[in-house]
Image (cartoon, rainbow, N blue to C red):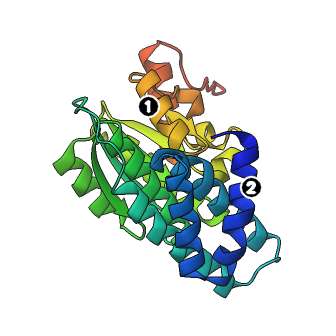
Amino acid sequence: MSKSVTNSLSQQYLEPLLTGDRNACRACIEQAVNRGISEYDLLVKLIWPTMELVQTLYREDRISQSTLNLATRLNRTLTDQLAAKLPRGKSNGRKVTIFCGDDEPEELGGQLCADLFESDGWTVRFGGGGVPNDEVLKLIGEHRPDLLIMYGTLPSTVPAVRKLIDYLREVNSCPDMQVMCCGGIYKRAEGLAEEIGADLFAPDAQTAVEVANDNPSKRASFEQQTVGRTRRIRKAQARKAAGTPATRNSTAA
């Protein structure tokens, strides 16, 4: 899909999306499919960028909460319809578990990640938002994924992700599992994913699949992992293993 076609289609799609006009948005998608645009291209070059644009408009107070909700829920409905028609690749033997923030935009982004990974041949579990850490740990233990993805677009989601990653490192749950941070907040804040201890970073769902496939063994270093108590413990343990004392205390005779 060329850039000119993308821009034209985006303009045609955005206006009825912001008003919640389901018939007009559905007709726009159907016309695009009839013109030969694939469901995959519509998801990654229309649905996802439009979702990010709508979130930007909301953050800048250019649209209301109700408009955000109308657009996001309609986008999600059309995502369901397009994802159902995606090709299903042969199983690659790898598993991914995906969680996200509590808000509707995060749910949509996490769902799109799940759809694209499944189309690529991964076995997917999508837990959505609002799942307590102990239940996340339980699902990880049951599913034993190769990759855990935390998707987020809002700054408010970052502290919980940081806490979860620290928790997973502390209990050493599924030590061979990689952790990826994906979504707009990690794209806008350069280096944030590394700062909170993620092994991998991707700005969007399409890139997430590529990054996961290209980096099956990449791990965060000690210096990249989450600041705080458990990070200090890990660094002290690393120094001890290397034979370097953490501190040198001297006392007067």
Residue nearest the observer in this picture, 36 or 142:
36
Cα separation between marks 1 and 2 = 32 Å
Report which quarter residue 194 is drawn in: top right
Tell me the amino acid under the disc marked 2.
Ser
1 or 2: tag closer to the N-terminus = 2
**Which residue appears farthest toward the top when viewing the image?**
243
Residue 122 location, x and y as percent? 29, 38
Residue linked to disc 2? 8
Residue nearest the observer in this picture, 26 or 206:
26
Q: Is residue 227 left or right of residue 91?
A: right
Residue nearest the observer in this picture, 169 or 65:
65
Report which quarter residue 118 is drawn in: top left
Q: Is residue 225 above or below residue 154?
A: above
Residue linked to disc 1? 212
**Label 2 neighbour load within 10 Å: few <14, some 14-19, many 20+:** few
Residue 232 visible in the shown view: no
Residue nearest the observer in this picture, 94 or 23:
23
**Label 1 neighbour load within 10 Å: few <14, some 14-19, many 20+:** many
Residue 39 location, x and y as percent? 46, 50
